[in-house]
């Protein structure tokens, strides 16, 4: 079985690294990390990913803008949004919420993350 | 001898003349009347007072020459001071209105009986015009009354100012409190965000290590589990902080407050039974609905109920009450708040949660609603429960207050406005 390619975008470097370790250890994923929205978009432009996980709350370009740009680039690739405030109506608009293929609340538990990823991939495959 | 008599008579006549001049020089009018009340002698001021020729004065009845009145009406004859003196009263004195002149005047009349001999009983009447003095007195009285009235007005104004000042102080205190809460909220939300990411790294790190240790390392597994629980506990604190700072908008709808309390109790009620606590419900039937965000108010009641539970580790009694109340009958802080913020005619739904628990020491009561103030052991409370409850109740324009006696128990009172139909 070929590994799923995941792009992980978060400005918290250590979090990216340990998440990458955890995901790759499952043997099912190959993870590329980016530490900002623009860097993530650049990676997505030059390589193809099966799924993108992006933080919402980042300096400069937030996760909503990243999500938007990714969907414009490749509408069928699923994007999971993670945030401290996933239930905060003021920061994540209804539009962004609908556009995302998954939402996960921080701090991210590994088992929950795996379930969210698999669900988003399955939905992406259907769509 | 005769010459001596003549000279003595001359001497006396001279003296009498001088006496008459002297008696006319004084301001008071003087009259001497015989036993029948007829004028025998008078001085010049008396003539000026009655303003009549000598012939009309001498031997005339003094009562006729001196018409007096009282309260704007003529004095009855028997009350006339001259008649009083003639009827045997040794001294008669009083002040009267003089009705014989062109101008209104006030006279002070003093009538004294003079006994010249056994048969001859006469009366001397002294009359003083006190019109000016009376006017001055009246003016003084009027001024005093005016001064008293203006002093009373000043006192009333001062009392009004005092009330206004107190209201202002309490409004200011509320504003300061609200501002403090907002600042704490902002700080908390900032801290929460900064803490969330490190917590995420710890959690992912633990997830990583969990994959590295196998079933043969039970100690490591246990330690990792402890770290994970600590992360979850920290996360709970952070979430509480965010909930506190993030003013969720209200989604109000008309609710039966007793039902909201019952539902809240339903969520935590089992624990009361487990702790040997009996629950009394004293709900008033037919209370008008309150317009509230049911979920947020449930959060408040659950908070209050859990506090009551923790206050009764040895068991006890929990009493839940609801009643309609006039704003002014509420505990003083709630009444002040209600009267300041509610529309006229709005009544209160008064809810009380009473426990028979350990109570709160008097010195801690004022801090009970302060964020992060807690008396619970470490890890059992963030000290935000009552702060959040208060902020929710106040968003509903309501109030919450605590009365407590150490060793006896605690009553939490929550008052919410009952919105009048059609005024919504």
Image (cartoon, coloured by chain):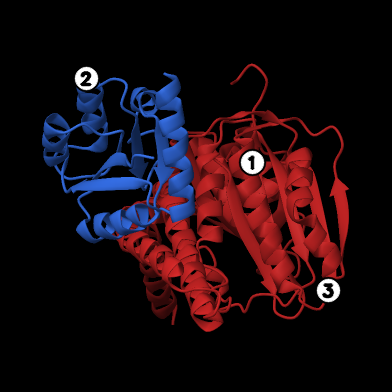
Residue B414: x, y in percent?
A: 66, 50
Q: Residue furthest top?
A: B422
Task: Name the residue tied to disc 1.
Answer: B416
Give me the C-alpha separation between circle 2 and circle 1.
Answer: 50 Å
Residue drawn at 63 percent across, 57 percent down:
B303
Give me the C-alpha separation between circle 3 and circle 1.
Answer: 30 Å
The quadrant in which residue B122 appears is bottom right
Query: How would you rate the neighbour count of disc 3 (Cα within 10 Å): few for under 14, some for 14-19, many for 20 or more?
Result: some
Is the residue B404 above or below the residue B1 in the image? above
Which chain gets the blue colouring? A
Residue B207: x, y in percent?
A: 42, 63
Q: Earlier in the sequence, mark 3 or mark 1?
A: 3
**Which mark, by number, is residue B315?**
3
Q: Nearer the viewer, residue B235 or A71?
A: A71
Name the chain letter of the residue that bears numbered label 1: B
Q: How many marks?
A: 3
B169 sits left or right of B318 in the view: left
B221 sits left or right of B131 in the view: right
Residues under numbered marks 2 and 1 in contact, where contact means CB atoms less than 8 Å apart? no
The picture's colour for chain B is red
């Amino acid at each position: 079985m070929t590994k799923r390619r995941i792009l992980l975008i978060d400005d918290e470097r250590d979090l990216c690294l340990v998440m990458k370790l955890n995901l790759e250890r499952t043997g099912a994923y190959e993870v590329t990390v980016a530490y900002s929205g623009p860097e993530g978009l650049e990676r997505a432009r030059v390589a193809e990913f099966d799924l993108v996980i992006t933080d919402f709350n980042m300096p400069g370009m937030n996760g909503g803008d990243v999500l938007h740009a990714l969907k414009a680039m490749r509408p069928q690739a699923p994007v999971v949004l993670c945030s401290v405030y996933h239930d905060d109506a003021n920061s994540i608009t209804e539009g962004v919420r609908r556009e995302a293929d998954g939402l996960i609340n921080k701090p991210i538990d590994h088992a929950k993350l795996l379930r969210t990823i698999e669900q988003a991939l399955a939905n992406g495959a259907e769509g | 001898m005769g010459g001596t008599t003549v000279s003595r008579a001359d001497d006396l006549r001279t003296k009498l003349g001088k006496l008459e001049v002297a008696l006319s020089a004084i301001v008071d009018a003087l009259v001497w009347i015989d036993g029948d009340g007829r004028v025998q002698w008078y001085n010049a001021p008396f003539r000026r007072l009655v303003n009549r020729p000598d012939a009309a004065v001498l031997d005339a009845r003094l009562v006729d020459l001196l018409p007096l009145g009282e309260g704007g009406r003529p004095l009855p004859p028997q009350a006339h001071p001259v008649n009083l003196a003639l009827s045997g009263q040794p001294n008669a004195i009083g002040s009267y209105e003089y009705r014989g002149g062109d101008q209104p005047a006030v006279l002070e009349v003093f009538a004294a009986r003079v006994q010249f001999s056994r048969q001859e009983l006469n009366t001397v009447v002294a009359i003083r015009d006190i019109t000016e003095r009376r006017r001055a007195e009246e003016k003084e009285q009027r001024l005093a009354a005016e001064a008293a009235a203006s002093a009373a007005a000043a006192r009333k104004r001062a009392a009004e100012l005092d009330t206004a000042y107190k209201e202002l102080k309490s409004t200011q205190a509320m504003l300061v409190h609200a501002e403090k809460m907002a600042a704490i909220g902002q700080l908390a939300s900032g801290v929460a965000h900064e803490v969330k990411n490190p917590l995420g790294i710890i959690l992912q790190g633990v997830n990583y290590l969990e994959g590295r240790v196998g079933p043969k390392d039970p100690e490591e597994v246990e330690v990792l589990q402890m770290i994970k629980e600590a992360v979850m506990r920290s996360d709970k604190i952070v979430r509480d902080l965010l909930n506190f700072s993030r003013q969720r908008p209200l989604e109000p709808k008309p609710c039966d407050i007793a039902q909201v309390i019952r539902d809240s109790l339903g969520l935590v009620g089992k624990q009361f039974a487990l702790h040997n606590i009996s629950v009394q419900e004293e709900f008033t039937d037919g209370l008008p609905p309150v317009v509230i965000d049911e979920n947020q108010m449930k959060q408040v009641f659950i908070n209050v109920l859990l506090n009551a539970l923790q206050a009764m580790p040895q068991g006890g009694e929990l009493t839940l009450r609801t009643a309609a109340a006039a704003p002014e009958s509420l505990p003083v802080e709630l009444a002040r708040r209600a009267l300041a913020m509610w529309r006229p005619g709005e009544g209160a739904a008064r809810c009380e949660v009473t426990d028979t628990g350990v109570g709160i020491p008097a010195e801690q009561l004022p801090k009970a609603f302060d964020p992060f103030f807690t008396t619970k052991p470490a890890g059992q409370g963030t000290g935000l429960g009552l702060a959040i409850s208060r902020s929710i109740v106040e968003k509903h324009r309501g109030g919450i207050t605590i009365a407590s006696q150490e060793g006896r128990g605690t009553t939490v009172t929550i008052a919410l406005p009952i919105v009048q139909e059609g005024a919504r």
